[in-house]
Amino acid sequence: MLTSRRAGYLRTASYAAIFTGVGTSVYWLYTRRDSSVSPGGPSFDIRIRQRTPDGHTKMTTKSIPRLPSNAIESQLTANAKSESVSRPYGVTWRHATASLNSNDPIEDANAQLILRKDRKNKGDKTRDLGTAGDLLFFAIMDGHAGPHTSRLLAKALIPAVALELSTLDKASTELEGIGPLERSHDSYLSTAWSYFQALVPFSRRFSSHIPSEDPKYVQLAIQTAFANLDSEIINAPTRILEMLQSKSDMKPWDHPMAAASMLPALSGSCALLAVLDTERRDLHVAVAGDSRAVAGYWEEDSNGQGKWRVEVLTEDQTGRNIKEYHRMVAEHPPDEAPYVIQRGRVLGGLEPTRAFGDANYKWPKELQERLVASLLVPGSAYRKTPANLKTPPYVTSQPVITRRTLDFLPSPNRRSNSKSTLRFLVLATDGLWDELSSAEVVSLVGGHLEGRRGNISKAELAETITVPKSNEGVGIEGKDAASKANQGSTDGEWAFVDENIGTHLIRNAFGGADKEKLSQLLSIPPPYSRRYRDDVTVTVVWWEPNAREEQDQIVAKL
């Protein structure tokens, strides 16, 4: 039976339809000016091959009015936000997030939280032993087949990981929120604490004597939180059905919890999480899916000048990643090897090999049929069981975690003479990486932080980057090579016009200083836009020195 805590938690899922997208249409784009279609302004046409009611296809032309410049700007800035918080160890943390939808509604999501760790005397909890540093969390989620899983993760993933990390030193550490980044989380943090403590017994797996400074335990805690949260998402419909089968007075699909449990399970989402531990000067980046994290390092030369160096912290987890291909083939019987990965996709359908939800790649076929028949209203659209599904699960939420040192933070015990300093971190869904290379992103962020403004030639900005030797530091890109054809070109100009760095990256992903291209791409409405661009969400985190007396006050407690 679903407990009241579970019920409250899963009600965060919406009751909208599972699918948004372009269906069976294929689009071609070309431009023209036609005042008869868009009076007083330009327009352009897209060619559509569309299936007719009798099952045939035909070609049609759809005229798209070009949006005015103020509407384009509104799209770019509507979901942009930036915040900062100053800390007593001499650092001001800043972050900027922006998103642009192609699906309607957007299937991406994001979340941020900063927690302060305060040491307490184990024998006297009222005695404060001083600040033990901060835990900073930044997450982005890339949903597919609907927004339901990503929206749930935006509410639950960071609290789940934070609570699991707190068990590493539970006896002597308390976590408290620091404004203003966590203010939107106040209402659910205490609920999440109770929810996960009651629901997830894995919190007791770590005893208080485990040395929390050991990075392997931190990474194990993150992996455990990912796995258990996905388990809750996938198993909730089964528990709901067991509960409802005892109620003979109603059809199971009429109960509000039927859809609320099924939708996050049937849709799916990649997740990318960065955890910065200032006490131990550690950065942990966990990825499940094909979102990507890159770091920008400033490399100073002997003359006091320097260039930016890009380090890709994650690998795109798709069937085109040879490591993921071999892992998946090894996890299933030899006779399944020809079709576990087809055309770079799981069973020929799903592109990411790791994700939350996606129950139709994790449930046995018989269970899928029973849950769909019982918990979805008859006639509802849903993703069918993949062909050749024999030995699920084929998709996992287990993240791959990368650790780096926050070498810019002060440390009384560690001194560094390195001229290479980590300066910023970029997290983005694959919609950004479809358009920009990792090196281009680092150069654009670096240029923004340097104060560049106006139009800058791509060739000029490319000179600010240290090109990695061979494949060192470039990561694995798990996309079709055709989608990368325009990346790295030094023709044209970048635009430095936005205050928000996230918006700055999105603008340059879809045209930059080429206002004609930008206007065209952003004028195409859903669902047609999905043929030309994906949802994009990007978070940029950076830090600046501050006066130590500047401190933010506690405004919430976990």
Image (spheres, grey):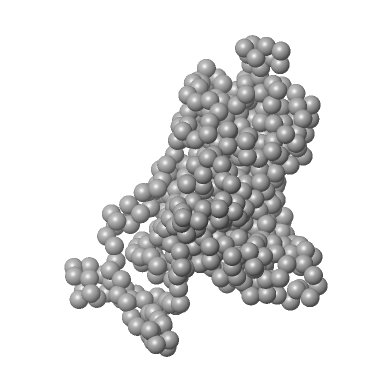
Residue 432 in percent (x, y) is at: 51, 57
Q: Is residue 176 left or right of residue 314?
A: left
**Where 368 falls versus 189 (above or below)?**
below
When asked about the image quadrant of residue 214, the answer is top right
Q: Is residue 351 left or right of residue 14?
A: right
Nearer-the-camera pick, 500 or 253: 253
Residue 294 in percent (x, y) is at: 61, 49
Q: Give the number of callouts.
A: 0
Q: Residue at x 69, y 62 (%)?
A: 393
Q: Residue at x 70, y 75 (%)?
A: 339
Q: Can you name the residue that lies furthest to the front here?
A: 248
Residue 499 in percent (x, y) is at: 40, 43
**Where 152 falls versus 346 (above or below)?**
above
Nearer-the-camera pick, 217 or 356: 356
Q: Residue at x 66, y 40 (%)?
A: 200
Tell me, yes or no, if residue 283 can be seen here. no
Nearer-the-camera pick, 47 or 32: 47
**Where 161 falls versus 73 (above or below)?**
above
Tell me, yes or no, if residue 20 can be seen here. yes
Q: Is residue 243 left or right of residue 467?
A: left
Residue 105 in percent (x, y) is at: 41, 57
**Where 105 falls versus 60 (above or below)?**
above
Nearer-the-camera pick, 445 or 132: 132
Q: Residue at x 45, y 73 (%)?
A: 23
The quadrant in which the C terminus is found is: top right
